[in-house]
Amino acid sequence: MDRVLRIGLLGCGTVGGGVVTLLAREAEDIAVRTGARLEVGRIGVRDVAKARARGLPVDDGVFTDDVMSVVEDPDIDVVVEVMGGLEPADTLIRRALELKKPVVTANKELVAHTGPELYEAARAAGVDLAYEAAVAGAIPIIRPLKESLAGDRVTRVVGILNGTTNYILTKMAEDGADYATVLADAQALGYAEADPTADVGGHDAAAKCAILASLAFDTVVHGRDVFREGIEGVTATDLRVADRLGYVVKLVGIAGESDDRIGVRVHPVFLPKEHPLASVRDAFNAVYVEAEAAGELMFYGRGAGAMPTASAVVGDVIDVARNLLQTARGAAESVHRAKAIRPIEDLQTQYYVLLDVDDQAGVLADVARTFGDHAVSIAQVWQEGAGDSAQLVLITHRAREGDLQQTVQALAAMANVRSVASVLRVESEVFSS
Ligand code: NAP
Ligand code: HSE
């Protein structure tokens, strides 16, 4: 194979290392499939010595800390951004597109922040911008939404979109593991973001949910539009109560369209054990798509880690390289419908509420009255513990989120309620919109 396309890699950490390894390991087949050999020409990093010490299958001379020089090098044909963060990634990608170089990125934070501007820059330049690895690691979900389901009407997308938090919740629930210890394991395994608060705080899943919602509903949804709660407050008691009632606790992203508005949210939920998403364990991800003609579809696989993510990145590199060789472009995003975001207060679902209370006669009646005063009906209630460790566990019927929030505020102000320990949404098999 005479034809060679040179890749400029921006970042060589967990994902970048996987990309270099995979391109070297599958070089022969990739060349045949692409119609050109794909070589890593330059690699931009922050610390060249650290990158070299990793002993990857590339010459030491390819590394530089001058990242813009990688993009602007006339010998570089395709730019792969796996450094993460908004800047300098945004500037580098825009410059690459300006130079008419196709770009592959795994950067969900950036795509959720400025995706439509980048799509437009790619369109204007006549080259591809591909980001399959940005959502759910190895799982093909961008291409199915953008291309395979283009003739259908998607009504809802529900996903376990973050490997780190799914790993943490699985280990806490199944092994009784301690939150901080499991988070450190997830970091060591290469699942977590450089700043893991992006994972546990739900920011990473919110960015992915925004990208999926944009593609599913042909509109622009930014990461900041997504209602978000993380898993930092989920306790062993919450997991034990969920288990006793036939649920598991999962961090899910839910995007749905109804009444011409988009509901888009990420938070931990009680999910029935029989729901297909409940069996998604460890760092695995899954995306459940409901479409009018296709019905229900589920995409499942490894959502994080070096090689699974590299699989998606290299798949995109081959795709954009093939298009480059034919002076063509792949399918573009459609963002032709302006849609309002539905406020979380309008959500209707069930809730689990855990209260630390004084262990006295009449407290349960006072608590029940507070729920009733705000039109929130109680489905189940019982007491856990006694004396100083007395707690009330309440499961509501479906209620409006705005009413539930007011109830919680009123509960927190009651003299005989020491604290509102937990509030989690309870989703039935059919997710609320
Ligand atoms: P990482 O291990 O922290 O690696 C980041 C790499 O980028 C490092 O090589 C770092 O250089 C380089 N870098 C960062 N900022 C830089 C700057 N300002 N200038 C020059 N180089 C810079 O991160 P990662 O886990 O590979 O993630 C990379 C991207 O993939 C992120 O957007 C992430 O969200 C996304 N992603 C990750 C996964 C996963 O499982 N890890 C899965 C899907 C998507 P040094 O090595 O010198 O520090
Ligand atoms: N930190 C992310 C996760 C990597 O845990 O899912 C994949 O995007």
Image (cartoon, grey):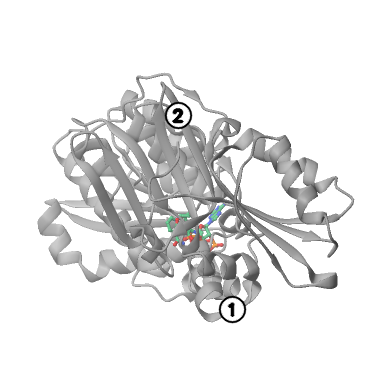
Q: Earlier in the sequence, mark 2 or mark 1?
A: 1
For label 1, the crowd category at 10 Å Cα-Cα, with few meaning under 14, some 14 to 19 and many 20 or more, is some
Residue 4 in sight in this render: yes
* Disc 2 secondary structure class: strand
Marks 2/1: CA distance?
37 Å
Identify the residue position indicated by label 2 in the image: 262
Image location of residue 424, percent across then percent down: 60, 52
Q: Image height check: is 190 above or below 379? A: below
Image location of residue 76, percent across then percent down: 33, 47
- The front one of 273 and 134 is 273
CB at disc 2 and ligand 2 closer than 8 Å: no
| Residue drawn at x 41%, y 64% as measured from the top left | 273
Image location of residue 349, percent across then percent down: 52, 42
Q: Are marks 2 and 1 in contact (CB under 8 Å)?
A: no
- The front one of 120 and 180 is 180
Residue 19 in sight in this render: no
Q: Is residue 254 left or right of residue 153?
A: right
Amino acid found under the numbered disc labelled 2: Ile
Specify the farthest residue to the bottom.
175
| Residue drawn at x 48%, y 73% as measured from the top left | 189
- The front one of 300 and 198 is 300
Indicate which disc residue 73 carries.
none
Identify the residue position indicated by label 1 in the image: 177
